[in-house]
Image: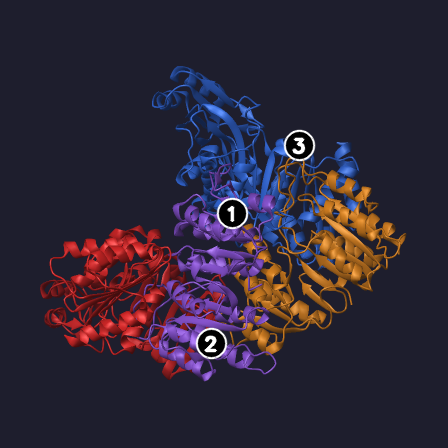
Chain colours: A red, B blue, C purple, D orange
Amino acid sequence: MKLFEYEAKSILAEYGISVPQGALASSPTKAKVVATQLDAPYVIKAQVLVAGRGKAGGIQFASSPEEAAGITERILDMKIKNLSVNDVWIEEKVNVQRELYFGITIDRARCCYVAVASAAGGMEIEEIADKEPEKIVKILIDPTLGFRSYHAREMARRLGYSGKSIIRLAKVFTKLYVAAMDCDAELMEMNPLVETTDGNFVAADARLIIDDNAIFRHPKYETRFLSEGQTELAPEEIEARRAGLAYVKLEGDIGIMGNGAGLVMATLDTVQHYGGSPANFLDVGGGASEEQVASALNILLTDRRASIVLINILGGITRCDNVARGILEAKKKVDFTKPMVIRLVGTNEAEGRRILTEAGIHVLDSMEEAAQMAVEIAGGR
Amino acid sequence: MKLFEYEAKSILAEYGISVPQGALASSPTKAKVVATQLDAPYVIKAQVLVAGRGKAGGIQFASSPEEAAGITERILDMKIKNLSVNDVWIEEKVNVQRELYFGITIDRARCCYVAVASAAGGMEIEEIADKEPEKIVKILIDPTLGFRSYHAREMARRLGYSGKSIIRLAKVFTKLYVAAMDCDAELMEMNPLVETTDGNFVAADARLIIDDNAIFRHPKYETRFLSEGQTELAPEEIEARRAGLAYVKLEGDIGIMGNGAGLVMATLDTVQHYGGSPANFLDVGGGASEEQVASALNILLTDRRASIVLINILGGITRCDNVARGILEAKKKVDFTKPMVIRLVGTNEAEGRRILTEAGIHVLDSMEEAAQMAVEIAGGR
Amino acid sequence: MGIIVNRDTRVIVQGITGIQGNFHTRLMLDYGTQIVAGITPGKGGTEVYGVPVYDSVSEAVEKHSATASIIFVPAPFAAEAALEATESNLKTVVLITEHIPVKDTIQIMAYAKRQGTTIIGPNTPGIITPDECKLGIMPSHIFAKGEVGIASRSGTLTYEIAAELTRADLGQSTCLGLGGDPVVGLNFVDALKMFRQDRETKAVVLIGEIGGNAEEQAAEYISSNLKSKLSPLPVVAFVAGRAAPPGKRMGHAGAIVMGNTGTAESKINAFKEAGVDVAEKPSDIPKLLAEKI
Amino acid sequence: MGIIVNRDTRVIVQGITGIQGNFHTRLMLDYGTQIVAGITPGKGGTEVYGVPVYDSVSEAVEKHSATASIIFVPAPFAAEAALEATESNLKTVVLITEHIPVKDTIQIMAYAKRQGTTIIGPNTPGIITPDECKLGIMPSHIFAKGEVGIASRSGTLTYEIAAELTRADLGQSTCLGLGGDPVVGLNFVDALKMFRQDRETKAVVLIGEIGGNAEEQAAEYISSNLKSKLSPLPVVAFVAGRAAPPGKRMGHAGAIVMGNTGTAESKINAFKEAGVDVAEKPSDIPKLLAEKI
């Protein structure tokens, strides 16, 4: 789960990391009020959960409360990568001497957390890794030892710091690590972490992604996890999440569902292979019930961009008869219909086929055949 | 640092372990008031920092607030192992089905914490170990893994529990472990941990010794650590602690100080070997300053039971001249005097001897000679 | 033969009295897996399909000389279960549970490494050595004994491909589900090393997907180790997720393209550079394999 | 020769710019100890008595091929320093610092065990192999090269006894301070195993005190291992604290009788049962030793 910049910064502040003074505003009027309580000049930042808002004009500067109000109005009117902006964060501009990067994330191959720092901050870390790999300093974190003060100091030293700055900077690093662990962060970064002209270190921007699987340990985010307007998810994605389904909205016209992430991905790939364009990814998971299949299909049927539905079920734990009944149930509830191509094999296959065939739905044997047929039908429209 | 029962219990309660309802009282009047707010019958317990208060009459029962007041009066008048009782803890009596022992302490040889449980609670653990060793269940705690829920359940099972009781009891064990680690406990125990007649587990008594060396991590105990009436230490011991000296009061008449714990212990032993009786243990530590030597000697000179002072210094880091000056300084301040036997060798020995000899103090070469002489002088008095 | 599990594997089921644990215990018993005990704290002394249930792993291992565990415990408690199994020195632990926090998984893996325990998963369908031992939740009937080793990051896609192989008379030595999480116990390289040692395995299918760089590492391993003329091991690969957009999790916690890393293209190219045939569609795999065995 | 440290030991001093670190660096240099670098975070680039100071252990170890560290860092930071030294794969770490919380010490020892690092202390005067290397704070002049190994839980008492030995012309191979804390890195058994392997050591003096059961374990080790006619190693012991009351710490955090455990009587009896001569007074030791060498 992604947190907004202002939320991530308030967590940093709780852990004793300096962040610029600032406040949230959801209207130009509010922006003017909060700006008056801060020292100019200001930075006004769209609170959206996608990277790259700077390039999209979502970060602007103002030198008076009036200007702040005007800029806030313009930013609130924007759409950034298809997301509307509900709030801006207004903060005091810091005096930058140097911009650093520091973050904690996961090294999948090494099965551990990794601390990553760079003397070139402000860009996305992937971009730094691409353009200036020699500026990146990494320390793999031994899970039983943790990220220790001396690891942090060694990173500060390797970034080129010396003297008391090593100790000051290292303290900021270790605080971020503790915060990241406490938050079950998948990624927590300060970028840029600004060294100010007076030698302090201030997190000018912060990003925090909490491990979705650990949300149960963070009750205050539990409702947020399922609510709209607070995430970068599309409304259909939220609906799917509430139903316990894995759903990703795409740009095409063939609605796709199946059981098992790999199988659904392969279905998308096969559709694309035959020249079609998937409207979504939807995995009903293992052992899906009639109800889950019905809610899944409902999402596809009500998606206006999907002109046809392709269902690919390989029954293992999932029982084909349950799937068949779920399909009929969903069709009943939605008062319009779409062409459906269904591939259904595996556990209780005969019963499942019988149920669908009796309802006049044609069932295929092979995923490729089904994908090909779906592409043809979609193309014919 | 030892905590009182009521303090240890309030920590247990913070960590979600059930303890009997109760309150503190420092007078019979207060006892009656608090008892009125509790359900009879009551247990009234002297709050002293020594084990064995039960046998000394420091734990009694009352069935009415009036009786509680009377008993409180009697207990507050007691001396338990030489300690006066400032407070009693009055709590509701629990209905005992079974008394258990559970504690976390340190296994010195294995360099780890150890969880110890016994189905025979209520006695001191050493007594259980002596009398019913087969009833003791131990789990060595891997420092990188900690004491896990399954360790706790396995202990509950080995205590003879089954079914849901295993899970209930194990939760109490793991809570105690977490509390012990958070408190930097050297020993934390529930004894007895009572299984009540309705199947709950309640800590009817609790003991907590915090690692003195970790007090700096527990600021709320820092001042307490150096204050009187709140510990089992004698006033002289508190004074020594404030001066950064290691001091233990004993029963004899030969005041002893030296540098280094082992050397002072050996000095005590040698005095005893020659038939003398040490009044104390006092270690001025390594590299003691003039001032520290002076405060140390002051403690010995003002101890009325010590008829003679034996000083044993082997200068390594500690400089003999500093010691000599400290001795003279302390003598100056105290307006009465005692015979002194001084052994002084090592770094700056010549200068130290000169200073003392000029002041008319005789200096010896050997610890044994010095001990023997001290015993003779003490015996002659 | 095959790898990791075989007819001598003595299994305990952790979470045996739960719905999933109970259901799959029956299916595994039906398959012939030697299930010697089950664990559910607080239910010691009961039985499930004749399998005795204990309160703790150590008790069960001691009494039944178990060598492997399969875990169906819900995510919030799964890490404890895995640590318990690892502490009892089991050789193999299959962690079926999905949605375990990655912080917990990291801790499990560190401890397993110290103890020398092999962890399969989490979020895996398990492992099957056909006709010998099934330690997982995969449908049994699609597998047949044979010479093809499969290692996969995906469940149903594996069934799809195993079924295709079986239909083409290409039986399997062992089929190993690595798990769909970002951090898992075994990766493709581990699997390849084991398959290479297994006399029964004559070729391997790797079923990858977007996210991470396990496929790239496998490609590197293959080109430096499995191309030698002395011990060549033919490998065919499939990579799911060409159609996946960046920054979105495709069902599996581990299936996500981050920036430019973890794309299907990168993986496919790495395999091709290592001389590994990459199937366009699952149904192409039997053909590609048939040329090599 | 001797054990653990010798003329080839390459030492870094952690906390070299503190009062204690600075003072003892000079004394160790005077003794001839090879001090190759010092560490104080934030003071990298400076020098102490010509010894270069670095910000981190890893940097110093890399540049100077150090093999051992001696730590003078204050207690609240000492654990981090010891972990840092251990992570850098130093062979030996001498932890002079007193008053380290035992929870920290336990963590240090667990990590050191994994890394194969020998920790001496905490709360130790250190170790000296006379005329070769002093890694500690003991007064140098009382030691002389020779054939007696000393392992001790106490500082000044060791000096007392070493001085007696030197006066009696009984030089020392190595004199090892185990440390006065309840949990320490090396115990008597570890020391005996090493002295047994050392060709220079012909007899050993163990200086124990109340608290714990390290002396009892040593006695057990001696009676099962050092009494054999093939490789006998004469051992003489002294135990301080006969006059100590139960439940009171006698200066050292580790010197405390708890209930009936850790008494001087228990230790003395154990030694006697193992056939070890126990000195009544420190000055008896040279006599007891002279009979054996």
Residue C276 shows in the view: yes
Q: Quadrant of the N terminus of chain D?
A: bottom right
Percent of width and height locating residue B100: 53, 31
Q: Is B299 on the left or on the right of B150, as rendered?
A: right
Identity, as a three-letter code, of the amino acid under mark 2: Leu
Q: Please say if the residues under marks 3 and 2 sit with CB atoms less than 8 Å apart.
A: no
Mark 3 → mark 2, Cα distance in angstroms = 70 Å
Badge 2 and badge 1 both on one subunit: no
Q: For residue B351, what is the image quadrant?
A: bottom right
Dot 2: chain letter:
C
Q: Nearer the viewer, residue B282 or A330?
A: A330
Q: Is residue D158 above or below residue A102?
A: above
Q: For residue D250, what is the image quadrant?
A: top right
Q: Which residue is the site of mark 2?
A: C289
Q: Is B260 on the left or on the right of A297, as rendered?
A: right
Dot 3: chain letter:
B
Identity, as a three-letter code, of the amino acid under mark 3: Asp
Q: Nearer the viewer, residue A217 or C162?
A: C162
Q: Nearer the viewer, residue C106 or C269?
A: C269
Q: For residue A25, what is the image quadrant?
A: bottom left
Q: Please say if the residues under marks 2 and 1 sit with CB atoms less than 8 Å apart.
A: no
Q: Is B381 on the left or on the right of C92, as rendered?
A: right
Q: Residues within 10 Å of mark 2 (few under 14, many from 20)?
A: many
Badge 3 and badge 2 both on one subunit: no
Q: Which residue is the site of mark 1?
A: B147
Mark 2 → mark 1, Cα distance in angstroms = 50 Å
Mark 3 → mark 1, Cα distance in angstroms = 26 Å
Image disc number at residue B115: none
Q: Is residue C164 above or below residue B137?
A: below
Q: Earlier in the sequence, mark 3 or mark 1?
A: 3
Q: Residues within 10 Å of mark 3 (few under 14, many from 20)?
A: few
Percent of width and height locating residue D172: 80, 61
